[in-house]
Image: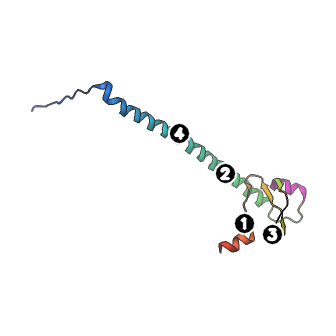
Amino acid sequence: MAINFIVILLPVSGMLTPVTGAYEIEQQKLERLIETLEIEVNSETEKAVNVGSFLKLIQKHTNIKELNSTILREFIEKIIIHERVKIDGVKSQKVEIHYNFIGLVDIPDKTKIAESA
């Protein structure tokens, strides 16, 4: 049984450079993508832990008889009160409540709910 080999000689210096350059660029893009995805995964994991902690806090206080400063401090990290504005003769003032563990919860305005329905 005979085995035949075909050998192709390529000039290494000129032909492989564009291929390796493209490979290196693609490799750098993939490495940056991996870093970005790892950050996102860590962020989502942290959010899941925070939601779990918030749910434990809610379970602890399911039957509140009296709302006091201790309970408020357990739930609320900070409250931001924005400047009062007057639009079309109607005064309004935005208030942001940032909760411990979960941060700011965006609760839509009644008018926005009605508009989307």
Callout 1 amino acid: Pro
Between label 2 and label 4, give the one nearer the viewer: 4
Q: Residue furthest front?
A: 88
Circles 1 and 2 in contact, beta carbons < 8 Å: no
Q: Would residue 18 appear left or right of 105 to someone viewing this image?
A: left
Circles 2 and 4 in contact, beta carbons < 8 Å: no
Q: Residue 104 occupies which quadrant of the picture?
A: bottom right
Q: What residue is disc 2 on?
A: 47
Q: Earlier in the sequence, mark 3 or mark 2?
A: 2
> How far is disc 1 from disc 2 in space, using C-alphas?
21 Å
Q: Which residues are magenta?
A: 68-76
Residue 74 magenta-highlighted: yes
Could you say where residue 56 lies in the image, as x and y percent from the top left? 74, 56
Q: Residue at x 72, y 66 (%)?
A: 108
Above or below 2: residue 61: below
Callout 4 amino acid: Arg
Q: What residue is disc 3 on?
A: 88
Q: Which mark is residue 32?
A: 4
Callout 2 amino acid: Lys
Give whichever of 86, 29 is nearer the camera.
Answer: 86
Q: Earlier in the sequence, mark 3 or mark 1?
A: 3
Q: Earlier in the sequence, mark 1 or mark 4?
A: 4
